[in-house]
Amino acid sequence: MFELKNATMIYDMDKEEKVYAMRNINISFPDKGLVGIIGPSGSGKSTMMYTMSTLKNLTSGEILYNGRSITGIKDAERQTLRRDEFGFIFQRHYLVPYLTAVENAVLAANCPKKEAVEKAKEILLNIGLKEKELDKIPAKLSGGQRQRVAIARAMMNNPKVLFADEPTASLDHENAYLVMDRLREYAKERLVIVITHDHSILRDTDMTVEIWDGSISDVKQGLLQETA
């Protein structure tokens, strides 16, 4: 689904000492499955996600999505791609403060409101929110609960690719594993890319990419790729 060819991202281009967030990365990703991208802070893992999802532009190189280059596409094409094909879970949840958990989850839903509300409730309950919390505004929810609302919002339109940047950072281990189990289930028919520094949440991934100083240091294939 994704192929990166000599993908390079340089920050501080106008300075004498340039910072390479990505350095000549070449890699292909599967059409579906759970992919973990892991590395320490500043290793370039989030930059990889941002460039693959068209939120940032490469300095050089190319990214192909379904065989088509998405490097340098027009803004309107980027917006259409992100709306119709991609879903996003960020470290910060970016919830609307005066809307309830359910209302936040359905904010960008592309189906009728009644259907969207029922779907949002089902997803929220599946990833650990309680019935009594569905109608609470973000200020009345814990950080972990707010993150689960953000995850539900990302899943609402059944995106073909779900990008998750540290999706369990604000959760305890029990709830982190609950969320990862839900993402793993979602990844059976779609591609889920999880950016993290925590090895413990990447159990049973189909592919794990380790990044160090902007370069890929290791790629481990899981059961899905080995038996494909």
Image (tube, rainbow, N blue to C red):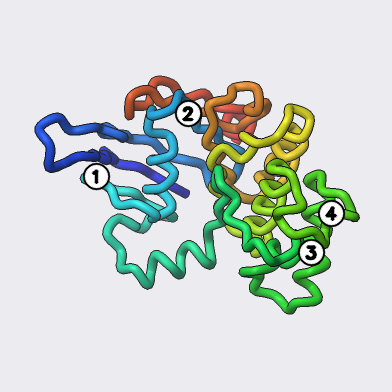
Element under label 3? helix
Element at badge 1? Answer: strand
Marks 2 and 1, how far apart at CA:
19 Å
State which quadrant residue 47 falls in. Answer: top left
Across and down, in percent, residue 63 comes to: 34, 49
Which residue is painted at 35% across and 42% down in the image?
A: 4
Q: Is residue 147 above or below residue 76?
A: above
Please say if the residues under marks 2 and 1 sit with CB atoms less than 8 Å apart.
Answer: no
Q: Circle 4 sits on which residue?
A: 133
Compared with 56, 102 (above or below) is below
Say what secondary structure mark 2 lies in: strand
Q: Earlier in the sequence, mark 4 or mark 3?
A: 3
Q: Mark 1 or mark 3, which is nearer the start of the sequence?
A: 1
Give me the C-alpha separation between circle 4 and circle 3.
Answer: 16 Å
Crowd around label 4: few <14 · some 14–19 · many ≥20 (10 Å)? some
Q: Residue 119: which disc?
A: 3
Q: Report x, y in % for residue 225.
A: 57, 33
**Does residue 200 appear left or right of residue 80 in this picture?**
right
> Of circles 2 and 3, which is in front?
3
Tell us which disc is closer to us: 4 or 1.
Answer: 4
Which of the two labelled residues, at mark 2 and mark 3, occupies the earlier sequence position?
Answer: 3
Q: Who comes first in sequence, dot 2 or dot 1?
A: 1
- Which residue is outermost to the right? 132
**Callouts 3 and 1 close, C-beta under 8 Å:** no
| Cα–Cα span, label 2 and label 4 | 36 Å
Q: Amino acid at mark 3?
A: Lys
Nearer the viewer's eye, disc 3 or disc 1?
3
According to the picture, the residue beneath numbered tag 1 turns out to be 61
Measured as percent of width and height from the top left, residue 93 is found at 60, 50
Mark 2 — residue? Answer: 209
Mark 2 and mark 4 lie on one chain; the one further toward the N terminus is 4
